[in-house]
Amino acid sequence: MFKLPKLVALTAVVAVSSLSYTAPANAEDQLAVSICEYIAADDKNRLRSKLKSSRVKIRNIYDAVQCNGNNLLRHAVASNAVDTGEYIVKNLSKSALTDGADIAWAEGNFASSPLIAVIKDRAGL
């Protein structure tokens, strides 16, 4: 009979501790979130500073980081972030842009974006 209250108490402790546990955030996830936020805010200076302090280059993370399901350049186009979009384009290799997928996507969804001309110029299209 004495074992039942201990079992109930133990179950309650486990239940409370499992509800209060939060997984620690991954540093890479925090970096990606910051990059996405700076692009959306069109804050080129903070984006550059964050990349530099993290010792990361745009061309190295371009394919890995997704912002709202889009790559960095598409996120800039969707956010109408011209300054950060130009910064991204200038720091990408031409070969990353020559397939025309980002241009076609931008023209189909955001035809009036000034970044389309910047992308075409960099890609040589």
Image (cartoon, rainbow, N blue to C red):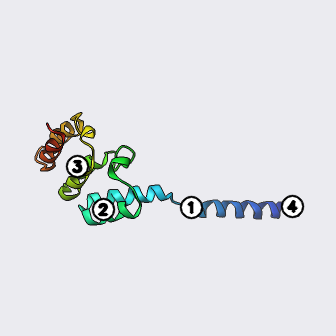
Please say if the residues under marks 1 and 2 sit with CB atoms less than 8 Å apart: no
Q: Name the residue under label 3.
A: 89
Which is closer to the viewer, label 4 or label 3? 3
Q: What element carries label 1?
A: loop
Question: Label 2: few (<14), some or many (≥20) within 10 Å?
Answer: some
Q: Where is residue 84 in the image (x, y as percent from the top left)?
A: 23, 57
**Mark 4 and mark 2 in contact (Cβ < 8 Å)?**
no
Q: Which of marks 3 and 2 is nearer the N terminus?
A: 2
Q: Alpha carbon of mark 4 to alpha carbon of mark 3: how far?
A: 67 Å
Q: Which amino acid type is marked by label 3?
A: Val
* N-term-proximal mark, 1 vs 2: 1
Of residues 33 and 64, which is closer to you in this image? 64
The residues tagged by marks 1 and 4 sit, at their Cα atoms, a distance apart of: 31 Å
* Rendering coords of residue 20 (x, y %): 60, 64
Q: Which mark is residue 22?
A: 1
- What residue is pinned by disc 4? 3
| Residue under the image location 46 percent in, 55 percent down | 28
Q: In this view, does 16 lie above or below 87?
A: below
Disc with the residue nearer the chain's start (3 vs 1):
1
Label at residue 48: 2
